C-alpha cells in the first residue's frame, strides 16, 4: 500500500489540504535528494482550522489536529515537487511552531501527534529528528505551523 493511501485510511486527503496563499517564496525547494518544505499552517479546504492561542482559546487536542493538518499540507508540497509521496525515502526533520500562552509548556505533546502520524504512515522511513517551539503568535492566527525536510529517491 502506498503512502497516500495510508494517509487516506487515517482520514487525511491531499486533495482537501489547503494551498498556501501566494507568497514571495516557494512552498518547497529541492536540493539534491532533500526537499525543504516551508512552514505550512493547518488548513482544510483552504481555510485555517483552530485559529488562536494554545492554552487560551485552543486546546491541546485541537492543536494536535491542526498540527497534523499542517503536516499533511507539507506532504502536499512534497508531492507537488516529485509527483508521488512514494518517492519519499526518509522524513528527516519536523519543526513545529505552536502559538501559545507564556505558561503553556506542552509544545512537545502537540507535536507528538505529528510524529505518531509520520511513523504510522511512513514506518521506518518516518523516524525523524524534531523541534517543538512556542511562539507568541503565528501568521494568520494559526495555532500551529509545521515545516519538514524529507529525503527522496534519486531520479537519475
Image (spheres, helix red, strand yellow):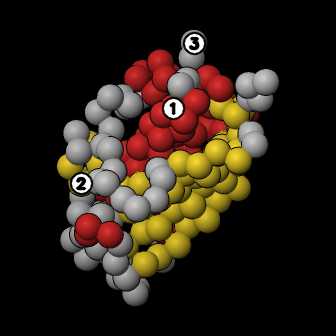
Q: Are marks 1 and 3 in contact (CB under 8 Å)?
A: no
Question: Residue 69 at what x, y percent from top left?
Answer: 37, 45
Q: For the point 42% across and 28% down, which residue is it?
A: 10
Q: State the residue position of label 2.
A: 48
In the depicted structure, whether residue 129 falls above or below residue 101: above
Q: Is residue 118 left or right of residue 44?
A: right
Q: In terms of depth relative to the viewer, which is nearer, 6 or 60?
A: 6
Label 2: few (<14), some (14–19) or many (≥20) C-alpha neighbours in 10 Å: some
In the depicted structure, whether residue 18 falls above or below residue 88: below
Q: State the residue position of label 1.
A: 79
In the depicted structure, whether residue 42 falls above or below residue 2: below
Q: State the residue position of label 3.
A: 1
Q: For the point 20% across and 49% down, which residue is it?
A: 47
Label 3: few (<14), some (14–19) or many (≥20) C-alpha neighbours in 10 Å: few
Q: Residue furthest top?
A: 1
Secondary structure under tag 1 reads helix
Mark 1 and mark 3 lie on one chain; the one further toward the N terminus is: 3
Q: Is residue 117 left or right of residue 56?
A: right
Q: Is residue 24 left or right of residue 116?
A: left
Mark 2 and mark 1 lie on one chain; the one further toward the N terminus is: 2
Q: For the point 33% across and 51% down, which residue is it?
A: 20
Visible in this render: residue 134? yes
Amino acid at each position: 500500500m502506498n503512502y497516500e493511501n495510508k494517509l487516506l485510511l487515517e482520514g487525511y486527503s491531499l486533495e482537501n489540504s489547503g494551498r498556501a496563499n501566494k507568497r514571495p517564496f516557494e512552498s518547497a525547494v529541492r536540493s539534491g535528494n532533500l526537499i525543504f518544505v516551508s512552514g505550512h499552517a493547518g488548513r482544510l479546504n483552504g481555510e485555517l482550522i483552530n485559529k488562536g492561542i494554545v492554552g487560551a482559546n485552543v486546546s491541546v487536542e485541537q492543536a494536535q489536529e491542526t498540527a497534523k493538518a499542517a503536516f499533511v499540507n507539507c506532504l502536499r508540497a512534497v508531492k507537488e515537487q516529485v509527483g508521488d509521496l512514494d518517492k519519499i525515502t526518509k522524513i528527516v526533520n519536523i519543526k513545529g511552531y505552536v502559538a501559545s500562552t507564556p505558561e503553556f509548556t506542552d509544545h512537545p505533546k502537540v507535536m507528538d501527534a505529528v510524529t505518531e502520524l509520520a511513523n504510522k504512515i511512513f514506518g521506518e522511513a518516518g523516524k525523524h529528528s524534531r523541534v517543538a517551539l512556542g511562539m507568541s503568535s503565528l501568521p494568520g492566527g494559526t495555532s500551529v505551523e509545521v515545516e519538514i525536510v524529507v529525503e527522496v529517491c534519486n531520479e537519475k
